[in-house]
Image: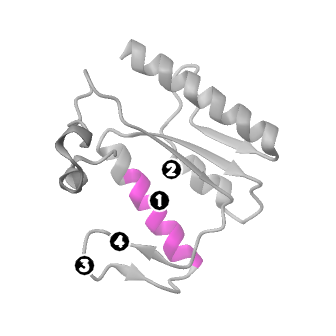
Amino acid sequence: MLSESWGGVLNASQRPAKFDPKKVGKYAILMTDGEFNLSYFDATSVGGVYNDAGKETTRTAATKLCAAMRDKGIEIFTIGFKLDKTNAASTLQNCASPDTGSVKHFYQAADGAELDSAFQTIARNIETLALTK
């Protein structure tokens, strides 16, 4: 629902709005345990399925995907849940949009209560951002 490029698979009334920073805000919330899967799909080509790619390859692919989303004007919030993998926190911090004023974009949660709190804070921030932009 973030990319208008995929709008053709939906009914006209359900298609994502074209990005216009003055009228439309696009937000992504990514949550992970930091365990990057060893497979991923690169939608830039038909044969873009990579199985057993290796953790660093999938981590690099995730970082590139986040950068491409930010370049398209999508604001990214990330939540790390029970992060215990090497480089997981730094990958999520790099993926998240830069913090602005009081709006934080990277969260870590160790349990359900912290996870709920992170989602609630993000929802309030998005609501505030949407009303002020």
Residue 103 seen in this snapshot? no
Looking at numbered disc 1 in the image, what kind of residue is underneath it?
A: Thr
Report, in whole angstroms, how far the alpha carbon at label 1 lies from the one at label 3.
21 Å
Query: Among all residues in the image, which is located at the extreme top?
Result: 132
Count residues near mark 3 (Cα–Cα under 10 Å), then give few for <14, some for 14-19, many for 20+. Answer: few
Residue 42's label in the rendered image is: 4
Q: Residue at x 18, y 54 (%)?
A: 8
- Boundaries of the magenta span: 55-67
Residue 63's label in the rendered image is: 1
Discs 4/2, front: 4
Count residues near mark 1 (Cα–Cα under 10 Å), then give few for <14, some for 14-19, many for 20+. Answer: some
Does the magenta segment cover residue 59? yes
Does the magenta segment cover residue 1? no
**97 shown above or below 42:** above
Q: Quadrant of residue 41?
A: bottom left
Badge 1 vs badge 2, beta-carbon distance below 8 Å: yes
Residue 54 location, x and y as percent?
Answer: 55, 82
Discs 3/2, front: 3
Looking at numbered disc 3 in the image, what kind of residue is underneath it?
A: Val
Report, in whole angstroms, how far the alpha carbon at label 4 lies from the one at label 2.
17 Å
Count residues near mark 4 (Cα–Cα under 10 Å), then give few for <14, some for 14-19, many for 20+. Answer: few
48 vs 75, left or right, is left
Q: Secondary structure at mark 3?
A: loop
Badge 4 vs badge 1, beta-carbon distance below 8 Å: no
116 vs 65, left or right, is right
Report, in whole angstroms, how far the alpha carbon at label 1 lies from the one at label 2.
6 Å
Q: Secondary structure at mark 2?
A: helix
The scheme the figure's colours follow is one colour
